[in-house]
Image (spheres, helix red, strand yellow):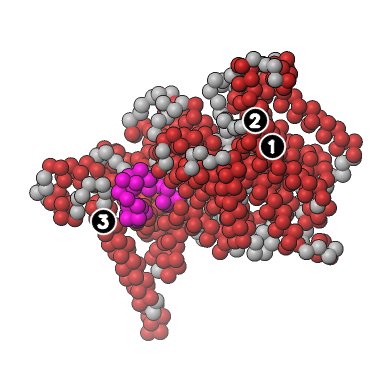
Amino acid sequence: MAVTADSTTAPRPAALTSRTGAAAVTTALLVLVAALALLDITQGTASVGAGEVWKALTGRADAADASVVVASRLPRMTAGLLVGAVLGMAGAALQTVSRNVLASPDTLAVNAGSYLALGAVAVTGTSLPILASSGVAFVGGLAAAAVVLGLSGLGTGTVRLVLAGSALALGLGSVTEGMLLLFPEQTEGLYRWNQGSIGQNGFDGVVQMAPVALAGLVGLLLAGRRVDALSLGDDAARGLGVPVRSTRVTVVVLAALLSASAVTLAGPIGFVGLCAPALVRPLARRFRAFARNRAHVPVAGLAGAALVLGSDVALRALVSADSAVRVPTGVVTSLVGAVFLVVMAVRAKDTSEAAAPDRLRIRSRKVFVSTLSVLVLALVGVTVASVLLGDSKLLLGDVANWAQGTAGRTVTFVLDTRVPRVLAALLAGAALALAGTLVQAVTRNPLAEPGVLGVSGGAALGAVLLVTTVPAAGAWGVAGAAFAGAAVTAVLVFGLAARGGFPRNRLVLVGIGFQAGTTALISLLIVLTDPFNATKALTWLSGSTYGRTMPDVLPLLAVLVAGCAVAAVRRTELDLVALDEDTPRLLGMRLAPGRLALLTLSVLLSATAVAAAGTIGFVGLVAPHAARALVGRRHVRVVPVAALLGALLVCTADLLGRTVIAPAQLGAGLMTAVIGTPYFLYLLVRSRR
């Protein structure tokens, strides 16, 4: 019996140590959050120090100091605590039930769905109380999460969930941006709100959202035992009598409710739901107490509160008080989250299988010639329609007179402004399609394209930086800045993902991380710049060809001609590189220099396209896939067909954006995102099969 007693009591000291360590860590987190909260209260434009804050809290301060502390500082700090806590808890719950360390309200498009739903309500001019707005955000976020989880599969533990969520978020964000451009008065302030700011005017919002957040937390804690059973595996959980599907759905609904409360109160605070659980995860491996959901979720909430308050404190410490007021806290957390996502993508083992090549189709020369002829005719028709149609309708005779220099002043003005726009759309579409073809061939990744890989985001960052700081910069200057941004981003993305021959999941995830980082930096530039430059940058980022002139088109024309010539000369090399790793080496090809040259060319094409026509997504994904489906895999045929398809797609999108709701206009980038998002999701579903 003594042996039995000793063996029974032996684990107790270890368990006690685990509990003691967990209690110590929790206490340290509480102290950190409290310290950050006190420091956050003392920061701001008004000179209110710790002494004045204490006097205000004890009722001994003068009216001015008390007003600043009670009406602004305390509500801001409390909102930061609440938002960080609920996002951290939501991310922890989502990661547990999906068994995916990359799951969060951002990567599941919950924030994007809430943003779209609130934007749709704002467009109608309806003013809703904060609780009703929370309900709208909840419905939008839950619907987006349902789409992502339905496409990727719940509990599969793959990065497909992140890819589907990021693509859907881009599509929903494009629709919302279109609303902002079409209804600027009704949606005034919505763009700034979308960056995520914890600034508050009084405690009304915090008081109304706190019960919603509390209800979500109580629900997660009540489901804690079932969620713990899910971590043992679906079969084991079913053996313990846990309803697997209903438990997962319940947790997702509760996480969406928590996210909706945070979005309603402060806008989307990016990536807190991704980073907070990642900070707690090593603690759970060391202290067993944190492995249980009922402890893991609240601790992740503390980590989230520390992240949000720490980001707010760091922002106000690094920049001037006047500038800090204008910079949303969500921009800082998005930058931190982008770094987290890249690091996690690089460190994670890529378990994806080698990208299966498209089914080899043997197409006859007749099919290729027929396809090429149809595309040329369609492109001619769309080009003519684009020149003739718009806010002012013209006739072919007007165009002929303009070409001969005999047109009237009105017709000359219209065509002088419209023709460069049409050329910019045509050339940008062809350049992006060619860039996507080259990237997919070199990386053998069907999901690769300049936008998804962050290259377009880097180009946009470089161009916006120049546009907002040097408004009078010329076309070649913008093109150079865009190329510099794209080049730096491409070197980082391809360099970090190159280990093991560009594995598909790591490459795309690293690209998504950089895309998120460049988006945050662009938002920072737009918020800080002059309002005129901000409007100019927003219009340009939507993929608009508005205001383009012939000098803007010339850099893109030169690069596109050179790119087509290189692709034609190296068509056989493209076929071999796209096949596998071994065949080119057996034939004596040096893969590294060839890959570098082709990737450099794709970056140059993407950068000049972004400089000429703004950010236009998914063209580099859709056009190469459609071209291979039509004419097979030989690049001597794929390159011209993809270029024609890209030009046709962007020119059509630009035409629709200029004419459907004339005199108002939508950028071609918004239209192509609406088309490209479903296609990207279709590719994910097809690869899952």
**x and y percentages locating residue 608 in the rendered image:** 63, 43
Return the residue found at the far left: 60
Give the residues drawn in magenta, as a range.
Answer: 310-334
> Circle 2 — which element?
helix
Instruction: Work out whether residue 371 or residue 560 is closer to the camera in this orientation and state it.
Output: 560
Task: Give the quarter of the figure containing the N terminus.
Answer: bottom left
Amino acid type at mark 3: Leu
Whichever of callouts 1 and 3 sits on the residue coming sooner in the sequence is 3
Residue situated in front as seen by the camera: 131 or 156: 131
Residue 108 visible in image: no
Q: Is residue 531 above or below residue 507?
A: above
Identify the residue position indicated by label 3 in the image: 39
Is label 1 in a helix, a strand or a loop? helix
Amino acid tagged 2: Pro
**Residue matched to label 1:** 427
Q: Are marks 1 and 3 in contact (CB under 8 Å)?
A: no
Q: Residue placed farthest to the front in the image?
A: 405
What residue do we see at 57% from left, 43% from top?
Answer: 478
